[in-house]
């Protein structure tokens, strides 16, 4: 009986102590007390990393522009001014997709499921849709693709990819299966972006049983944009606005 | 004897409690950093972020100034003769295609707000879970001949990726969260009607999933240029054959 009381007493003392400590801890930081989870900290860390990447990009751009200004200021005669403009024109043509490009990359061949009976839940599951291609393109861009074409149509910022009856419309032209998507970039990352488990391409291939074949190639040729898109409404922003 | 048993039980529980607390502290320390309270760390991060954002704004301004200067030079040259003027016009055209130029014009503004929390089940859904929708909206806009598109002021170019990162989206490597504001320059009535078609994409967003969608035409929309450096490390231009 004596022993049991002793133990109880010890427990009581320690509980009281613990309680005091907890109260002191809470009191100490009452002003800045708010919910901070590990997740929010991780998120803001990400954001900081992103912003510093942006700043880096901006700094390189600024250095580039300063050099350009120097070069322009040093030119006196007309022909060198022309060459500067021409150089800039070539660079912009490459960035805008008006240039044939070649380099290592991957070729994806996508085909509807060829079985006569319905394999998926619905016939629609056996057919390639616009959203499938949009997702694959997005994955390729995440993997850093530098130029993409589908059945010879260069993908531009204003390229639409829309289902239109039995075929898909890209750049105003109707294309049908099989779709051959070519992308130039780091072949390994591009390949992984379509084939790694949990990517959209993997899901299409294994869940919906769409035929997707990916091959890495050392030299791919992607032709320039051949459409004639006209800017009717958009105008360059005026200076001093 | 009975007392002893109780003591052993308490001891075991205490040992477990100790291990659990130690693991918890270790995990928190790893993420937060040694010897810091999470709240302090969060404040530190917030101030750091603020500083970086200020720096970014300053750099953007500087870049704009430099670009303005270059533009003046180019225009000055362009006024001298017809050949240079044509070169300059070409340059502007291709820059618009590449998205390297601020543009303005008539068009539409689409704002997508997350649906309010479901009162009955407490479920929350967010546009972050439905990146497909954003991809499709952009495609629909392009199908109706949109000339420039931006998502939360990030210009949509052929290199623009849309990635989910935790509970927000990254576009052009910049964090973006709801509400999503998509701007498009083009024939505004065509753009509006193709989006608001019954059974179309906005109908799905509004009636199936309760997103709060606002679509309006505007006379003048400004869309900023693409501000990332796209380096071509793998792709090389094909040398043109002499013909």
Image: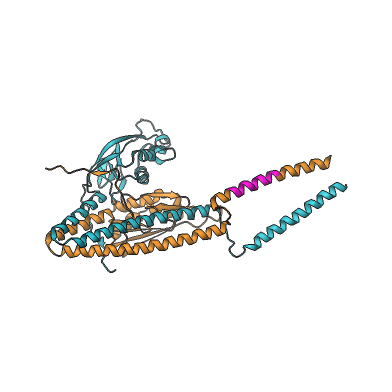
Chain colours: A cyan, B orange
Which is more toward the observer, A223 or A123?
A223
For the point 65% across and 60% down, which residue is it? A26
Magenta-colored segment: predominant secondary structure: helix
Q: Is residue A2 above or below residue A111?
A: below
Horizontal relation, residue A33 to residue B193: left or right: right
Residue situated in front as seen by the camera: A145 or A81: A81
Residue drawn at x 44%, y 40% as measured from the top left: A198
Q: Quadrant of the N terminus of chain B?
A: top right
A232 left or right of A212 in image:
left
Q: Quadrant of the C terminus of chain B?
A: top left
Seen at 16% across and 62% down, the residue is A76
The image shows residue A94 at horizontal and vertical percentages of: 24, 49
Residue B20 inside the magenta-drawn segment: yes
Image position of A101 (left or right of B5): left
- In front here: A75 or A92? A75
A10 above or below A33? above
* Magenta run includes residue A3: no
Residue that protrudes farthest toward the bottom in the picture: A240
Q: Is residue B104 visible?
A: no
Give the residues in magenta: B15-26
- The reply to whether residue B35 is in sight is yes
Residue B95: where, in percent of width, then height?
25, 56
């Amino acid at each position: 009986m004596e022993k049991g009381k002793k133990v109880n007493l010890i427990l009581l003392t320690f509980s009281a102590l613990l309680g005091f400590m907890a109260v002191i801890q809470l009191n100490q930081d009452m002003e800045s007390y708010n919910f901070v989870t590990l997740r929010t900290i991780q998120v803001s860390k990400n954001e900081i990393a992103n912003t510093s990447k942006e700043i880096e990009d901006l700094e390189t751009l600024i250095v580039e522009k300063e050099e350009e200004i120097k070069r322009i200021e040093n030119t006196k005669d007309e022909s060198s001014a022309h060459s500067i403009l021409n150089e800039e024109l070539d660079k912009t043509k490459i960035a805008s997709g008006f240039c044939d490009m070649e380099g290592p990359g991957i070729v994806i061949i996508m085909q509807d499921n060829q079985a006569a009976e319905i394999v998926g839940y619905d016939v629609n599951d056996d057919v390639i849709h616009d959203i499938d291609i949009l997702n694959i393109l997005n994955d390729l861009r995440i993997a850093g693709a530098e130029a993409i074409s589908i059945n010879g149509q260069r993908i531009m910022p204003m390229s639409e990819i829309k289902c239109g009856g039995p075929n898909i419309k890209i750049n105003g032209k109707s294309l049908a299966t099989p779709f051959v998507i070519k992308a130039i970039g780091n072949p390994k990352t591009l390949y992984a972006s379509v084939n790694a488990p949990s990517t959209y391409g993997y899901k299409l291939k294994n869940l919906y049983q769409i035929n997707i074949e990916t091959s890495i190639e050392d030299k791919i040729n992607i032709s320039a944009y051949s459409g004639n898109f006209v800017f009717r409404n958009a105008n360059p922003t005026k200076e001093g606005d | 004897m009975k007392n002893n048993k109780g003591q052993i039980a308490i001891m075991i529980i205490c040992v477990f409690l100790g291990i659990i607390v130690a693991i918890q502290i270790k995990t928190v320390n790893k993420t937060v950093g040694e010897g810091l309270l999470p709240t302090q760390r969060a404040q530190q991060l917030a101030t750091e972020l603020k500083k970086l954002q200020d720096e970014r704004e300053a750099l953007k301004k500087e870049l704009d100034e430099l670009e303005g200067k270059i533009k003046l030079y180019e225009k000055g040259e362009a006024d001298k003769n017809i050949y240079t003027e044509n070169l300059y016009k070409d340059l502007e055209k291709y820059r618009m295609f590449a998205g390297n130029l601020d543009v303005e014009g008539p068009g539409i503004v689409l704002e997508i707000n997350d649906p309010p929390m479901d009162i009955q089940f407490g479920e929350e859904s967010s546009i972050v879970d439905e990146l497909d929708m954003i991809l499709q909206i952009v495609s629909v806009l392009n199908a109706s001949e949109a000339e420039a598109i931006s998502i939360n002021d990030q210009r949509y170019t052929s290199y623009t990726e849309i990635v989910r990162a935790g509970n927000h989206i990254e576009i052009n490597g910049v964090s973006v969260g709801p509400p999503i504001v998509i701007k498009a320059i083009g024939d505004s009535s065509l753009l509006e009607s193709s989006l608001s078609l019954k059974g179309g994409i906005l109908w799905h967003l509004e009636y199936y999933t309760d997103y709060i969608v606002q679509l309006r035409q505007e006379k003048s929309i400004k869309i900023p240029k693409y501000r990332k450096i796209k380096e071509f490390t793998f792709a090389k231009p094909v040398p043109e054959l002499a013909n």
